[in-house]
Amino acid sequence: MSRFKLTPVAAAVIGLCATASHAGENPTDPILLAQLSLPEVEPHENRLDPVVVTPSMTTQTARASLTPVAVIDEQTLREQQPLEMADILRAQPGVDIVGNGAFGKSTSVYMRGTGGSSTLLLLDGVRIRPATGGTPSWQFLPPSMIDRVEVVRGPRGSLYGSDAVGGVVQVFTPDGHGDPGAWLELGGGSFNTRSIGGGAAGEKDGTRYSMAVNRFDTDGTRLRRHGDDRGYDNTSGIVKLSHRFGERAEIGVMGFRAEGNTEFEPGTTANREDTDYLIQVGALRGELLVSDDWLMQLQVSEARDENENFTDGDLTSTFNTKTRAVNLKNHFAVNDYVELIVGGEYLRDDIESTTQYSLDNRENKAAFAQLMTTFGDLDAQASVRYDDNEAFGHKSTGGVALGYALNPHHRLRVSYGTAFRAPTFNELYYPGFGNPDLSPEKSENKEIGIRGQYGRGFWDLSVFQNDVEDLIASELRDGKYLPYNVNEARIRGAELQTGLDLDQWRLAMAITVLDPKDEETDELLQRRNRKSVRFDVDRDFGSVSLGGSAVFQDHRYNDAAATQRLPGYGLLDLRASWRFAPDWTTRVSVKNVFDKEHATARNYSGWNYLNAGRTVFVSVRYDIR
């Protein structure tokens, strides 16, 4: 009997497996399972203990994962009606959002107190980020194209390589799983916001397909007091197609594209500043069941992140990144209790810009391996990765974790892991600013956690310390303001995540407490907050559902010297939906109900970047079955 199940490649193409650009499986249809590896669960347990793939490169339940992970599933996304990626991730356990305003403005995701370039973003398994600045373009990912999000907390450098210092966020787009169907949705609301989208998906005779398009347009909000509204638009689409050849082979392709324009607050002499942007991903994926105990997966992908910047209609700069990747992964089921994964990855970044960098491309070659074993109530996991980068040399990372079942409902885990962040092209090669002698930032994380899992609820507590060396910061030396490896940071923290299903009630809570300190100055790291809390409550009344979310954030300092204080804040969101006919649903959301003025970053001129005030949005959806 085969130890592996061959996956539907439509899901595999979008990357539900795990090495930086490694595709895997739809979470509801595991790509590979050693016999007896997953327990039988009740339907309500599936949501409270979902199958995940990002933490360990293979399918397992959240309770079995030795790395803490949060899942925002399709049901949650529909209930919460996010208008931008920040709405999805804000105040999730270990996650802090820092942005220069709402609707298409620069957004960073700080995980566990690390910086914006230390969180790895995967879109259907493909690495997405500009190699110039390093911070992913979270603000340009349309929520309408998102089916599921997995948020993995803690270092994953031994699996994914560079940038996975604070954690990994993997975004999954819809898969063509199930009977053929289609949908159409229209919406509109505050700030003259408009949205229209539609799609179709299904499977038949071993072929899966999924396609969707969406247009989002808004006049935007003011970014500063007494400023003008700054608009944003996004046109996006995705196509996926796969076919299974018997029981041993499958191949598939996918393409994703989001493009549009976003406006910014202009400088003192300009009337308008805006950016035309493009995010594009293409992937070809195949998998072969070589033998009953060996599954091989290959993915070839290309990702583009492009920006054209304008001042008063004149092109001022262009920054384009093209990342090509080849990933090969082999799963070996040694026996019913041991699984080995061995693979390799090739990455090439190419830069095209109006700025003349001293080097405009670099290659990274990597090999990795992971061993997972089970001995009764004890689980063990060990992983190692070797990266050889032509810009900064070689880097090795590793991780080890142990889990022990105290009883059927409680599980203890301990882990140790290392990670690194590679210097960006701007830090290395930007004319007059880059320092080609920079070394990667390095981190060492120690962690202990415990999870309680019950029929209708769970809780998960993690306590950790992450020591980061060779932090890259800009300093004035010998009359030159350049980036150097200067500081060390010690980040201590605790996270509590809970979920509870009671009849028609769904409740969730996330609490994060951090102490992110610069070891040299003993000050809080720039723009980090120390405490955040999130509550989510939803209730079904047959065809009607009501819900709300409350977020509370501590204060932070905009500068490294801790002199520019940004106040903490509390936000309340409310939502409702009504299925007024078998295939028709209308939804209403009110975000920031009390119109609270709040900011997480300050401009160099001294004014705060304001996030959106009270925002009302109404939509109607028609499902064709």
Image (spheres, helix red, strand yellow):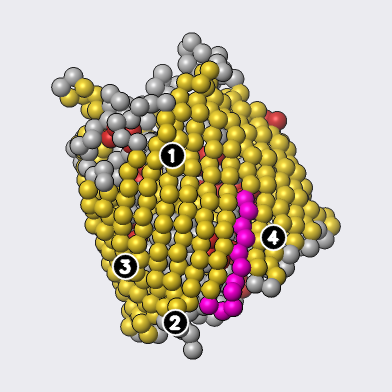
Secondary structure under tag 4 reads: strand
Which quadrant, please, contains the C terminus? bottom right
Q: Earlier in the sequence, mark 4 or mark 2?
A: 4
Between 586 and 405, the one nearer to me in the picture: 586
Counting from the top left corner in percent of width and height, residue 142 is at 59, 44
Could you give the CA–CA distance between mark 3 and mark 4, rounded to whole angstroms? 35 Å
Asked which quadrant contains residue 494, the reply is bottom left
Identify the residue at horizontal 52%, vertical 58% (top origin). 284
Circle 1 or circle 3, nearest the eye: 1
Amino acid on which disc 2 is placed: Ser
Q: Main secondary structure of the magenta part?
A: strand
- Tag on residue 321? 1
Secondary structure under tag 1 reads: strand
**80 left or right, relative to 527:** right
Could you give the CA–CA distance between mark 4 and mark 2, rounded to whole angstroms? 31 Å
- Give the residue number, with chain letter if any, for mark 3: 369
- Tag on residue 201? 4
Viewer can see residue 491: no
- Give the residue number, with chain letter if any, for mark 2: 291
